[in-house]
Image (tube, helix red, strand yellow):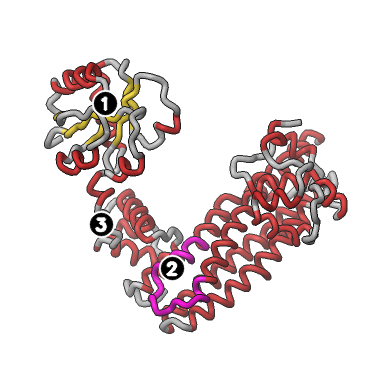
Amino acid sequence: MERPLRILIVEPSAIVVEGLLSILGKRPEFKCLHPLYSVGSLCDYVRKEKPDLLILNPTLAFDAKEVLALGLPLVALVYQYVEKDRLGFFNAVLDVRERSERIPAVLQQAWSSAPRPEEASDESYELSDREIDVLKYVAQGLMNKEIADKLNISIHTVISHRKNISRKTGIKSVAGLTVYAIMKGYIASA
Amino acid sequence: MSMNELSFFSARMRLSDLISANHNLILMFPRLGISLGFGDKSVQEVCEQYHLPVDFFMLICNVYTFAQYSPSADEISQTDMSPLLPYLRASHQYYLQGRLEHIDQHVHLLAASLEEKFGRVLCQFFDDYISEVREHFDKEEAEVFPYLEALQEGGNPVEDPRIYSYDEAHESIKDKLADLTQIIFKYLPANAFSNDAIDLIFDILQTAGDLEKHALIEEKILLPYIELLATHSENVK
């Protein structure tokens, strides 16, 4: 990793916060921002300090929609029983009883499983040039293997382009994508 | 009484209460031969009036309404399934001759208001879609349904069509209708829009939802039922 992950801890207990800061402080791959003990100024603080990852106590009274809108990977910090449905939108759960050497792995896993902030926040629904290339071939009825050969890329890459095309356009079927390609003028006709 | 009966619809409820809970149920009444005007009669009473096995009716209503409901093998084996194939055949007819034909007319009207090449590709898409649905229904009626009928009559049919992939066919039919709504409301030129286009989208969404339930009835009732009879027939052998 080229720069340390900026981590924001939001947790009411000073003991827990200090403990986490001390464990993570020893690891060069993390940089802990000044922690928050309540959620009051969370959103403003996130906009200003731009953390990469949020460690949040799920029992705090926060507005879930607002927190989700931040588009950050979320780690739930739990040390008591928490109802399952409060944990649904967290990318990982960190139990305070977790062994200290396991904690970095939990955070890394949350970071890599969550959508990247830049994708989540200002994602463009415009197809990229490469996606348009793939779309044209899909609309002409080519198979993934044939498209991969034509564009000199792996089948895996073709599939990932196709997933992005469907996610951006909302269209899944080849027939639907063909209509789309014609409407957009990418190909003349089927 | 099974768990299912406790938490889902029961035959003692008024039919009107079922409809208050899920008004889409009305859509399948004509296919079951039930007409409206049942007042405060219970499901049991209405079924008796129309000579419809009430356990079968409950099965259909519950699958149609509760996504989490899947009848157990026991429930399926204890249910009188005699109306199943007539219901499915009536449904096929309803979708092809009722819903899809209606939508098709409106897609053609909408297409006529578009630039010619766009209109053509839209009509082509929907014509292909209808052909695909028709092909799926035909295959069921020509292969799957007769197979089931032979099993129901206690026969030992040789031709086993269970290899046919329902999931794939249902998935594709579902995706294409969803794609059509996306294309219509996102990608048609803004000047193509009239109230007709909005009505059309609602029609498509309604039909898509109903077709999805139809697929569930086949996946959760028809296929397990065939499986059950086929296993039984193999054991008898």
Report the Cα–Cα distance between label 1 and label 2.
Answer: 45 Å
Q: Is residue B10 visible?
A: yes
Q: Residue at x 63, y 64 (%)?
A: B135
Identify the amino acid type marked 1: Glu
Q: Is residue B190 magenta?
A: yes
Identify which amino acid the numbered label 2 is placed on: Phe
* Start-end of magenta stretch: B177-198
Q: Nearer the viewer, mark 3 or mark 2?
A: 2
Give the number of the disc on residue B185.
Answer: 2
Q: Which residue is mark 1?
A: A11
Instruction: From the image, tell me which residue sits under label 3.
Output: A152
Q: Disc 3 versus disc 2: distance between alpha carbons?
A: 35 Å
Q: Residue at x 30, y 31 (%)?
A: A75
Q: Position of residue B5 (x, y in %)?
A: 72, 36
Badge 1 sits on which subunit?
A
Q: Is residue A78 left or right of residue B160?
A: left
Q: Amino acid at mark 3?
A: Asn
Q: Is residue B197 magenta?
A: yes
Chain of the residue that carries numbered disc 3 in the rendered image: A
In this view of the protein, which residue sits in the foreground, A76 or B115? A76
